[in-house]
Image: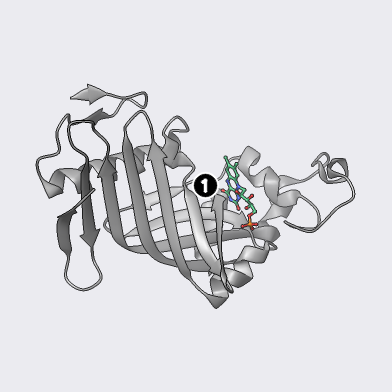
Amino acid sequence: MESSKVNLDIPKNFDSLKQTIDISNLILIDAVNNSKNQFHTPVVSSIDGDKIVSRVMVLREFDLKKKIMRFHTDNRAAKIDTFQKNNTATVIGYDPGLKVQIKLQGNIKVHIDDSQTLNAWNGSTARSKKCYSVKDGSTNPIDSPETHDIKDHNVEEGYKNFAVLIFSFYSLEFLYLKSSGHRRSIHDWQDDYKTSWLVP
Ligand SMILES: Cc1cc2nc3c(=O)[nH]c(=O)nc-3n(C[C@H](O)[C@H](O)[C@H](O)COP(=O)(O)O)c2cc1C
């Protein structure tokens, strides 16, 4: 076993497909609370009309059994409308310490003011909640950024601007980079579960 910067033991060799999904599960569970794990902030890409749009987001939950990832955002952001028009999304991350890339394909569902948002809000720290008190919402052009620094605020007021994004994935692709031979696999749950090695 090789030790990485995030204290996860990654096998030196991936001999079975099961190992690739088990390690992906370990990495993504660790990433939720470990900011040193690069999968803590994966890139979430979606489609806005004829454009692919990508952004970094904090991974708040990973559940392989339910096949979901949870993200938080501001419900005033323009991306809310784009997810509602086209829910196709890809989440991708790479950790150089682990030498692992994980890519997931799926769909995003937006939650605003329901039991999901209440649970997620109640589980958030005051520091995380603070972002949702920014005035005017996200992405609007402004004359200077100082006018939107958050100073006097009641964190709980931010709940009205809070949204939860549930990314339900149907495939997970694993890539492990190693000079002696890369290892790439796909796990697909679209119909019955299928898995295979891929040419890296
Ligand atoms: C380290 C990091 C973490 C971020 N986490 C989030 C997040 O959890 N939710 C979010 O909406 N935006 C997050 N952002 C900001 C987004 O990357 C993006 O700039 C913002 O959401 C606007 O994206 P949009 O134009 O696609 O709406 C994060 C940015 C960085 C650099």
Q: Tell me the residue at 60%/55% (across/down).
A: 73
Can you say which quadrant of the picture contains the N terminus?
top left
Question: Hey, what amino acid is under mark 1?
Answer: Gly
The percent coordinates of residue 124 (x first, y second) are: 56, 45
Task: Between residue 41 and residue 160, name the one nearer to us.
Answer: 41
In the figure, residue 160 lies in which quadrant? bottom right
32 left or right, relative to 84: left
Above or below, comparing residue 4 to residue 140 in the picture: above
Q: Tell me the residue at 32%/32% (across/down).
A: 98
The percent coordinates of residue 176 (x first, y second) are: 26, 39
Above or below, comparing residue 175 to residue 109 in the picture: above
Label 1, residues with CA under 10 Å away: few <14, some 14-19, many ≥20: few
The percent coordinates of residue 134 (x first, y second) are: 76, 50
- Furthest-bottom residue in view? 85
Q: Tell me the residue at 57%/72% (across/down).
A: 50
- Furthest-left residue in view? 15
Task: Between residue 32 and residue 14, name the one nearer to us.
Answer: 14
The percent coordinates of residue 3 (x first, y second) are: 26, 22
35 left or right, relative to 198: right
Task: Find disc 1 in the rendering and name its residue.
Answer: 123
Residue 41 seen in the figure: yes
* Circle 1: element type: loop
Task: Between residue 98 and residue 132, name the one nearer to us.
Answer: 98
Q: Tell me the residue at 85%/53% (across/down).
A: 142
Residue 66 seen in the figure: no
In the figure, residue 196 lies in which quadrant? bottom left
Above or below, comparing residue 153 to residue 78 in the picture: above
145 left or right, relative to 26: right
